[in-house]
Amino acid sequence: MSRRIQPVQSDERVGLVDGLRQQLEHWGKTKSAEETVVFSCGVAAIDRLLPEGGLRPGMLIEWLITKGGSGAATLGLLSAREACREGGALVVVDRSQTFYPPAAAAWGIDLKRLIVVRPKTARDELWAAVQALRSPVVGAVWGKFERLESRAFRRLQLAAEAGPTLGVLLRPVTARGQPTWANVRLEISPWSVVRGPSGANDEGRTANPGRLAHVRLVHCRGGREGGSTVLEIDDVARTVQSGFTYDPHPLRVVTELADPASRSRSARA
Amino acid sequence: MVLVRSAPRGSEVAVCCSKAKAEGVRLGVPLVEAQSLVRELAVAKYDPVGDHRALIKCAEACEQFSPRVAIEEGREPESLLFDIGGLEHLWGSEGRLAEQINKFFARRGYLVRLGMADTVGAAWATAHFDEAPADGMGRKNESSQHSSLGVRPSAFALPVESLRISEEAAGLLQELGIETVEQLKTLPREGLALRFGEKLLLRLDQLTGAGREVIEPRRSLGPLEASYVLEEPTADWAVLRFVFEQLVEQLARQLIARNQGAVLLVGSFGFAGETPQQFQVGLLQPSASTRQLLELIELHLERLKLRNEVDRVELRAAVVGNLGERQGELFADCWPIDPHQLAVLVNRLGSRLGSESVLRAEPRASPVPERAVKWAAIVGQNDRALKQENKKTRSRSPSSPGFLPARPLVLCSKPQKIEVGCIAPAGPPQFVWLEKRREQVVESVGPERIETLWWRGPAVRRDYYRVTTEAGRQLWIFERLTDHEWFLQGIFE
């Protein structure tokens, strides 16, 4: 005799999902992660999107860039700067040889603790990133990775945990459909460049227009995704101002859990 | 007397004698100014390389007095260090030995100052700062009656400069009213280490004898090398790995016996009838660890292509250092974490990627973006490509912290020529052609004019704009004012 399962009320379902999420978060944490301290990612508005209110050493943060020049490199560098506050080195993996240290220094990076690695091949790029992530003297590794296979990504994640070192990976938006081993995956795209009344002059030009970027939390291990915020990155004052933040809905829209009652009905049919 | 070197504005004083100094001549002043201060000033060319060569010759010749003769450390050494422990009976007394040394140098036309003590630090201090050091060579015996450390109490009355510390550190100590070593000794060590670094305490300990300092003879005891002849030529990496294991073990034993570590390893593959193929492995810190050296060699060999089958393998420690020494000043004073671990990482990266791929950036005071940074290999020497890149950096002075206008994190290694469209002849661009696509400019900030001075090489005259395209990209572009061509310099990412 089959037992009919009563439909769960909406409030109960929210509680159930939250409970499951907490359990997942707990299991997802490694021992080393529990021993580390949460630090800000450098931008308060992004911190608010993250489940723990910041990052931990040993995490991988993946920035998906929809179009060049959207601010991911700068925001990623701010996370790396915060990760190196305790004195660790910052390793920049710069295969394209375009990283410009004076600009990084202007954003607060200590060049005395900066190691720039210029690998010549994609293989060496991955190897160098793994070595740097695994090193206990490195606070953060920052680099652009066009292609990253799942196994290579996993190597980076294990190395970051072994460090424990923060890994900031800048990736093209085409990587969105690929599986990720990053703890946090953020997507960044330029926000409408039409200025509001605060910043524009008659010609639509401002004295110092900051870059407007829309940051969306695409994936977060053990947290709610879907939250987003608009940021203004000012390259002159070297500040990041938050515009407005969208609160994520407590339940995911796409991967909403099926109603237990309907599931049980379909199973019997 | 002064020694002069050439400077952009004529000759300047590099070294001056005490008499000239007393007349007001200072280092770095133009020669004409020095000549106006001192009548009949003797002038000679400053030749540090020649001086160093002469010092080496003197050191070699002085091995008749002691088997262990060393040249003091530092960029421009001027002292010889003799280990005379246990040699008194050969010369009768220390005084007789000093007399012989004085005569030896006098015959060659040198006037020298000698100092003898139980520590290198005290001997150096006495030779440099004691009023009459050369005449009292028997003082050590006399001093040992007064001091349990074997250093004359008067050595502590010497100025703080006698500790072989930097001029800045000595100046700072004097500003704080600490003039002598004696005064320094009474201060708490923790506070000194915090304010002046560990080096000051090390030098103090080396003077008193509390810290160890070994005189490493300049003339090496023999080459540090090992070789292996293969019975059959091979290109099999498994075999070559085994060979390197043997060679590294041999080399490590030799290094440990001398309390030294390798800083630069040179390996060589011999081929029958062909010139050998060499490779180099640089290290940040001296190491005699078999495991570490072997790992670095293996990482290097991963990217090496053998020209032919090998019949002989050689390994040589071309540059060595005392174990525990740090090479260079990378991250010195600001590194709260293990320098050994840092060396492990940098050595590994450098061994596989090449030392030219592991870099540190030194900001330079130049308004031209591509000249505002100088790249330096962390381990080893800059290669040709890096030297070429650094040629753009003409400014030798480091940049001082201050306001820097907006600069992109991504800078094109060479400005890329682009097409732009402007409504006004000297106005901001309205659209740009990028990657064969026309992008409308919706915002622009500028111009920021960057010009260089005519005596700094080819003149640069540019008007920079920060433009935002309709696609949301923010570009840093400039107009070259000499020919009104437009270039992309960087992207704000």
Image: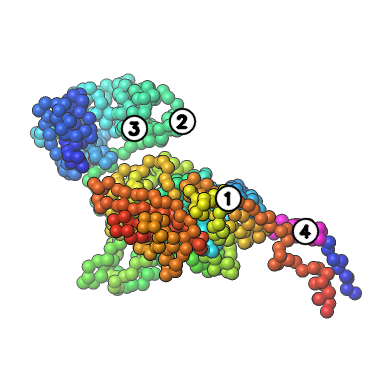
Q: Nearer the viewer, residue B15 or B278?
A: B15
User: Mark 4 belongs to which amino acid?
Assistant: Val
Task: Check chain identity for marks 1 and 2: say if they share one.
Answer: no
Distance of mark 3 from mark 1, alpha carbons? 54 Å
Q: Which mark is residue A197?
A: 1
Q: Which residue is mark 2?
A: B190
Q: Position of residue B90 (x, y in %)?
A: 19, 33
Q: Is residue B374 visible?
A: no
Q: Which residue is mark 3?
A: B168
Distance of mark 3 from mark 2, alpha carbons? 20 Å
Crowding near the residue tagged with mark 2, few <14, some 14–19, many ≥20 C-alpha atoms within 10 Å: few
Left or right: residue A188 compared with residue B115: right
User: Mark 2 belongs to which amino acid?
Assistant: Glu
Q: Is residue B70 visible?
A: yes
Quarter where residue B488 is shown:
bottom left
Q: Please tell me which residue is depicted at 88% across the width and 70% down the height of the picture.
A: A4
Is the residue A178 above or below the residue A32 in the image?
Answer: below
Q: Are marks 3 and 2 in contact (CB under 8 Å)?
A: no
User: Mark 3 belongs to which amino acid?
Assistant: Glu
Is the residue A73 above or below the residue B149 in the image?
Answer: below
